[in-house]
Amino acid sequence: MFFNPFSFFSLQNVKIRLLTPFLILVLLAILTGFSGGSHHAGKKQRYKEGELLVKFKKGIGGSKASTQHKVLGARVMKRFEGLNIEHIRLPEGMTVDEALALYKNNPDVEYAEPNYRFKKAALPNDPKYSQQWHHVKIDLVSGWDITTGDGNIIVAVVDTGIDYNHPDLKDNMWKDSQGFYGKDFVNGDNDPMDDDVDGSGSHGTHVAGIIGAVGDNGVGVTGINWKIKLMALKVLDRNGDGYMSDIVSAIRYAVDEGGKIINLSLEAGENVAGINSLKDAVEYAKNNGVLVISAAGNSGYNLNYVNVYPASLRMENLISVAATGSSDERDYHSNYGTNVVHIAAPGTNIYSTQSALAPGFKNYSTGYFSETGTSMAAPMVSGVAALIWSKYPDLSYKEVKERILASVDKVNGLNVITGGRLNAHLALTIDLDNMPPLKPENFSLDGELKAGGPIKLKWTDLSSLETCYKIERSLRSESVFSLLTTLPENSSDYTDSSAILQEGDRVGYRLFACNDNGDSEAVLLDLQIPLNKPTNLSVTRMAEGIKLTWQDNTTNEDGYEIRRQSGEES
């Protein structure tokens, strides 16, 4: 609709040379017409169309303000006394964007803004929501005001299967082109129903409910994502046991079928050797942009010294998760490790969905129960990763991981890489561009450490925003660190050829990622050149006993330790 300029003022009474810049803009707008209408037709506006809130600068009287409104064709609906703010109605056909441009170019106006729409903080109407303490702990209530998920994000639950008939899950279940909900790698078919009966049973279904039980549907509990697609991949049998071959197959399947996140709430025994197949599968996921979330395990181990897979894989696209209780204490079952486990998340007495095949199941209306473990903590992180991707679909897996790890609530005593517990709202809102980069992980020796030889160092780059790396070194008995070198962004290794050390000598390194906002936290590495081992050990039986002799190849030893094994001793 075009405006009739003569409905606002008479051109014969206007001397153009006296017009303010504001009036010139108004005249131009009137003469060219307000074309196109709203740019948001058909969409629910974030503000009320046809209205503005305008504040004139101090000293601008009411009569002058009224005149300027009239020139525009607007009328004052309400004045907020004491605030000098006016609630105005725009003339018919003028959009909010057009009016804002005019008012903001008026030198007498302090500000003009839309009449923004507000809503109550998003809370679901699911009746059992109040039993899910973890939502408040990780600030999901604020996070849900930003996003409640996206039904196009696929999370693969590699577990005991999922009860895809559960009323709180069925609408969020993924289906393949033939209508199957996933795959059963244990029994070799396309029916990934959760038949877990070990303990409380229902492991995969419980994990799935944490990630994505349908929200705000008036039924049961609320998932971290109200809308999502849950891919059921059964790799553990009814007793909760499975094999690496099936897990590898499931990871490959998830990647090939479009999964963005793979949840692994499972673990092998400690110090299992030869886990390369699993590593290759996670590498395949990495090469296809997929993020893998792993439970840290439930043996109370420090994974700096004990390997529990997949948590101990130390790969760029993997996040390892410890479990915490409602008071932010680390659950006593949970594994931890400041070099291996990235983050903690709620995992104690977590209330979620139950499979119809689980022990004690009565009906779906009561098909919910509480469970504890890092298996419950991992899907917390998987769920938040899905929220991030629903809000920022163009992020890489590395950027999603960075948001999660950079936004933790710091908690003393967790003994994880970040030193903190998951915070969903901060993960969605953090401004990484104005922060120092995340500290690198997996800072370690690359190869063998020999006296007199170079020292090769390696690490994993966690940040996408570093512009450099700094390495500091402390030699032998020095108590302070000094700068050794500065490296360019995306570096992941360095060879120290200037530390000529002898057997028994110690050397310490501190590694920082850096950018214009400062340095990351330091990552420490303490190394000691091993002593030369003795050689030519010989045994001579004598009347008074057994005589041992050997060749001493070091000058730095404090003594020798002799261990004996006899008979069937191990």
Image: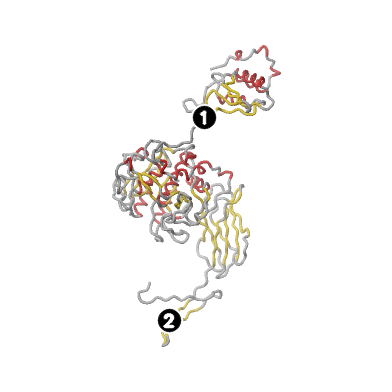
Q: Quadrant of the C terminus?
A: bottom left
- Answer whether labels 2 and 1 touch (C-beta < 8 Å): no
Residue 128: x %, y % from top left:
39, 41
Residue type at numbered disc 2: Val
Secondary structure found at label 2: strand
Q: Looking at the picture, tell me which residue is in the foreground, 352 or 564.
A: 352
Q: Residue at x 56, y 64 (%)?
A: 454
Between circles 2 and 1, the one closer to the viewer is: 1
Residue 221 is drawn in which quadrant? top left
Residue type at numbered disc 1: Arg
- How crowded is the residue under tag 2: few (<14 C-alpha within 10 Å), some, or many (20+)? few
Q: Earlier in the sequence, mark 2 or mark 1?
A: 1
Q: Is residue 477 above or below residue 232?
A: below
Q: In the rendered image, is residue 392 in sight?
A: no
Outermost residue toward the bottom in this view: 543
Residue 195: x %, y % from top left:
30, 48
Outermost residue toward the right in this view: 17
Secondary structure found at label 1: loop
Q: Is residue 89 above or below residue 549?
A: above
Q: Is residue 409 left or right of residue 296?
A: right
Residue 539 badge: 2
- How crowded is the residue under tag 1: few (<14 C-alpha within 10 Å), some, or many (20+)? few
- Mark 1 = which residue? 117
Q: Find the distance from the CA under tag 2 to the CA under tag 1.
A: 88 Å
Q: In the rendered image, is residue 501 in sight?
A: yes
Question: How is this picture coloured?
Answer: secondary structure
Outermost residue toward the top in this view: 12
Residue 566: x %, y % from top left:
38, 77
Residue 110 is drawn in which quadrant? top right
Q: Is residue 336 left or right of residue 556?
A: left
